[in-house]
């Protein structure tokens, strides 16, 4: 017996709309992802140094935690913004 199959409706030119919106939104981190990667890594290193040397001062510990958090988030965002290498056959 034949069963009813659900047919999906196709939307024409949906990829073109997405490409137009993403082309308009270009941020600094998307233009220079490697610079932000190195800046984030430097902030993490500075945060670790502040954490090691400023264990007796609450202000240095707070600055080190902020530096590590901001640097880590910058590294993650820069890795997401890096262009992916494609393999052409």
Image: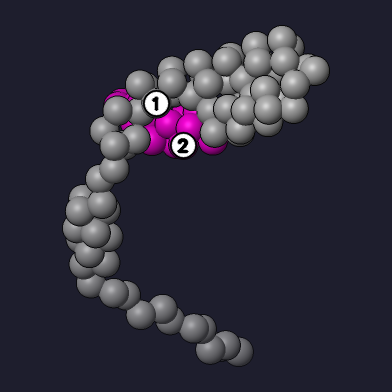
Above or below, comparing residue 69 to residue 49 in the picture = below
On the question of residue 71 being in view, the answer is yes
Say which of 9 and 25 sits in front. Answer: 25
Q: Which mark is residue 67?
A: none
| Figure colour scheme | one colour
Circle 2 sits on which residue? 77
Which quadrant does the C terminus fall into? top left
Secondary element at tag 2: helix
Question: Could one spot residue 72 in this view of the protein?
Answer: no
Q: Which mark is residue 36?
A: 1
Q: Is residue 70 left or right of residue 29?
A: right
Q: Residues within 10 Å of mark 2 (few under 14, many from 20)?
A: some
Where the N terminus falls, by quadrant?
bottom right
Task: Give neighbour class at mark 1: few <14, some 14-19, many 20+ (Cα, 10 Å).
Answer: many
User: Residue 54's x, y, as percent?
Assistant: 72, 15
As for residue 51 lying within the magenta part, the answer is no
Q: Position of residue 18 (x, y in %)?
A: 27, 60
Q: Would you say the residues marked 2 and 1 are in contact, meaning their CB atoms lie under 8 Å apart?
A: yes
Residue at disc 1, secondary structure: helix
At x 75%, y 21%, the residue is 57
Tell me, yes or no, whether the highlighted magenta stretch contains residue 73: yes
The residue range painted magenta reads 72-89
The residue at 26%/51% (across/down) is 25
* Above or below, 45 relative to 75: above
34 relative position to 58: left or right: left
């Amino acid at each position: 017996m034949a069963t009813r199959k659900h047919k999906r409706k196709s939307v024409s030119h949906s990829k073109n709309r997405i490409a137009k919106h993403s082309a308009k939104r270009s941020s600094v981190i998307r233009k220079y992802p490697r610079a932000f990667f190195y800046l984030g890594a430097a902030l993490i290193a500075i945060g670790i140094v502040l954490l090691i040397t400023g264990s007796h001062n609450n202000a240095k510990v707070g600055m080190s935690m902020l530096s590590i958090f901001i640097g880590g988030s910058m590294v993650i965002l820069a890795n997401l913004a890096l262009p992916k290498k494609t393999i052409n056959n």
